[in-house]
Amino acid sequence: MKRSNLAEMNTEELGVKLQEDLEAIQNLRFQKSLQQLENPVQIKHLRREIAQIKTAINEYSKGIREEKGVQ
C-alpha cells in the first residue's frame, strides 16, 4: 500500500487495515516457522506498512493530520 492511499483513509479504515495486517503478519510468521513461507520479504513489507498505519493514526490523534471531510 502506498502512502497516498493511507492519506485517503480515515481513522476507522486505518484501524481495520491495521488489524488485517497484524493478522497477516502473524500468519506469515507461522508459515516462516514451519518453513512454508515462499517469499520472506513479505514480512518486511507488512512491518513497514503497519508502521506507516500506526504513524497515520498517531498523527490523527495528535491533530497533525485532519480527516478529509471534517472541518
Image: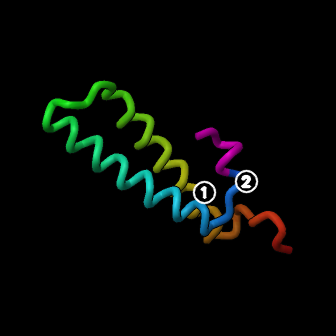
Count of marks, rendered view: 2
Foreground residue among 54 and 40:
40
Q: Which residue is mark 2?
A: 8
Foreground residue among 37 and 7:
37
The location of residue 17, given as percent across then percent down, is: 52, 56
In the drawing, does residue 63 fall left or right of residue 14? right
Q: Of all residues shown, which one is farthest toward the top?
A: 38
The location of residue 10, given as percent across then percent down, is: 68, 64
Q: Which residue is mark 1?
A: 56
**Residue appearing at x 73%, y 53% in the figure:** 8
Tell me the amino acid under the disc marked 2.
Answer: Glu
Quadrant containing the C terminus in the rendered view: bottom right
**Residue appearing at x 25%, y 30% in the figure:** 37
Foreground residue among 52 and 36:
36
In the drawing, does residue 53 fall left or right of residue 25? right
- N-term-proximal mark, 2 vs 1: 2
The coloring applied to the image is rainbow
Residue 32: name its quadrant.
top left
Query: Over which residues does the magenta segment extend?
Result: 1-6
Eye-nearest disc, 2 or 1: 2
Mark 1 residue crowding within 10 angstroms, few (<14) / some (14–19) / many (20+): many
Mark 2 residue crowding within 10 angstroms, few (<14) / some (14–19) / many (20+): few
Asked whether 2 falls inside the magenta stretch, the response is yes
